[in-house]
Image: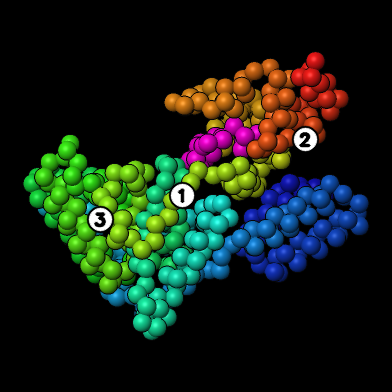
């Protein structure tokens, strides 16, 4: 079929929403191409159909929250966020569901199931209240930087169909005595007035341990105010706090959050799933995706995003001279880490040495066929390289 690559890209995009009618049309196209003995094109469409099945299995049902179950007024774009009285800096940023649609972050299986359960619980706030059960309004997300905590908060707000009020630290924290505590009170009063999700990003900046010898007495006033505000908000709506430094938090702060979720760095299987999403409309094969998953060992979702952006830039510039292996090697050279992983240290070596390393890796194993595709050579050549290790 002429322009099949364009048709395939359209099929991939269309299948993302799980529409049965679209699936039926893609199956019809596959059967028609099968009659024409276009085996490669049929295989490509079958992969799209299989991928759509997997996505449908892990995707939760669309969450619809009854607005009547929440207290407060509807927040509209005409409403202006509160500001610091001294500087005029806004205390928060307001994002409405139709302004930023964020895909559901990809996490390990059990964690993904837990997030689905959280959404289901928040969806049924009115059922909980009718049963005399207090909803778990407050959630703490913690873990290493770049693991998708903020993205998850935006996704949750979008799934609930609620505006997200995100606290702005540069506006909240003030050098004037007592102003930070007052700003926190004003922010919570604003959020409690409306139906919304309140996001406290970089939470440790205002929730530090109160007996820290390096802090002045002001931090005690700030944390005490924060605790009172979190307690008060439990009667009004959802609160999500995010921190990369959970060890800095005051113990009393932890007790205010019914749900506390650690967001880990992605394992190999999760990294491959992330990369498949990034390259759904590109020609990266399984060997390339495995190489990228292998080189981002111990990396975060943010690290994977940076690698993908770099590779795509190289692809756009080099065109027919582009090589995925060459691009990944360049990325490693141009994105040094403070603590370089062993994988990053060996990728710049000779092809045969790298092939032996990949073939023996237990976390992201490579077959000889995948290695041949990756290095652009034959399987006998790969076999000869691997035998060097036994001499």
Q: Earlier in the sequence, mark 3 or mark 2?
A: 3
Q: Is residue 228 above or below residue 203?
A: below
Q: Which residues are magenta?
A: 291-307
Give the distance between the C-alpha atoms of the residues marked 3 and 2, in whole angstroms. 52 Å
List the residue tagged with mark 3: 252
Q: Which mark is residue 23?
A: none
Q: Earlier in the sequence, mark 3 or mark 1?
A: 3
List the residue tagged with mark 2: 367
Which label sits in the foreground, 3 or 1? 3
Give the distance between the C-alpha atoms of the residues marked 3 and 1, in whole angstroms. 21 Å
Residue at (70% x, 69% y) in the render? 20
SS at circle 2: loop
Residue at (70% x, 65% y) in the render? 22
Q: Is residue 206 visible?
A: yes
Q: Which mark is residue 263?
A: 1
SS at circle 3: helix
Toward the viewer: 185 or 161?
Answer: 185
- The quadrant in which residue 256 appears is bottom left
| Residue 165 in the figure: left or right of residue 103 | left
Toward the viewer: 185 or 11?
Answer: 185
Residue at (77% x, 27% y) in the render? 376
SS at circle 1: loop
Toward the viewer: 41 or 202?
Answer: 202
Q: Is residue 233 above or below residue 81?
A: below
Quadrant of the drawing holding the C terminus: top right
Toward the top, the furthest residue is 391
What main secondary structure does the magenta stretch of the protein show? helix
């Amino acid at each position: 079929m002429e322009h099949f690559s364009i048709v395939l890209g359209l099929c991939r995009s269309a299948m993302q929403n799980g529409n049965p009618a679209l699936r039926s049309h893609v199956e019809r196209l596959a059967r028609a191409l099968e009659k024409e003995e276009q085996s490669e094109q049929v295989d490509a469409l079958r992969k799209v159909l299989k991928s759509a099945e997997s996505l449908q299995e892990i995707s939760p049902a669309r969450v619809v929250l009854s607005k009547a179950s929440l207290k407060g007024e509807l927040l509209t774009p005409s409403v202006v966020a509160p500001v610091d009285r001294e500087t005029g800096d806004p205390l928060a940023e307001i994002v409405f569901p139709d302004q930023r649609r964020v895909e559901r972050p990809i996490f390990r299986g059990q964690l993904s199931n837990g997030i689905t359960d959280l959404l289901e619980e928040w969806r049924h706030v009115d059922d909980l209240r009718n049963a005399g059960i207090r909803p778990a309004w407050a959630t703490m997300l913690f873990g290493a930087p770049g693991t998708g905590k903020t993205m998850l908060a935006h996704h949750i707000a979008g799934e609930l169909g609620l505006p997200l009020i995100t606290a702005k630290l540069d506006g909240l924290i003030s050098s004037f005595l007592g102003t930070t505590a007052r700003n926190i009170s004003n922010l919570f009063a604003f959020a409690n007035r409306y139906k919304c999700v309140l996001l406290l990003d970089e939470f440790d900046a205002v929730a530090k341990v109160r007996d820290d010898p390096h802090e002045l007495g002001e931090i005690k006033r700030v944390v005490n105010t924060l605790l009172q505000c979190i307690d008060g908000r439990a009667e009004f709506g959802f609160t999500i706090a995010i921190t990369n430094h959970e060890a800095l938090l005051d113990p009393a702060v932890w007790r205010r959050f019914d749900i506390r979720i650690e967001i880990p760095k992605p394992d190999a299987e999760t990294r491959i799933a992330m990369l498949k999403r990034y390259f759904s409309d590109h020609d990266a094969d399984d060997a390339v995706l495995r190489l990228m998953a292998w080189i981002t060992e111990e990396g975060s979702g943010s690290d994977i995003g940076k690698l993908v952006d770099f590779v795509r830039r190289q692809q756009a510039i080099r065109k027919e001279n582009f090589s995925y292996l060459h691009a990944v090697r360049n990325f490693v050279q141009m994105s040094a880490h403070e603590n370089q992983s062993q994988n990053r240290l060996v990728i710049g070596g000779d092809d045969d040495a790298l092939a032996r390393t990949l073939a023996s890796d237990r976390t992201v194993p490579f077959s000889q066929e995948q290695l041949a595709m990756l290095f652009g050579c034959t399987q006998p050549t790969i076999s000869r390289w691997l035998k060097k290790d036994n001499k």
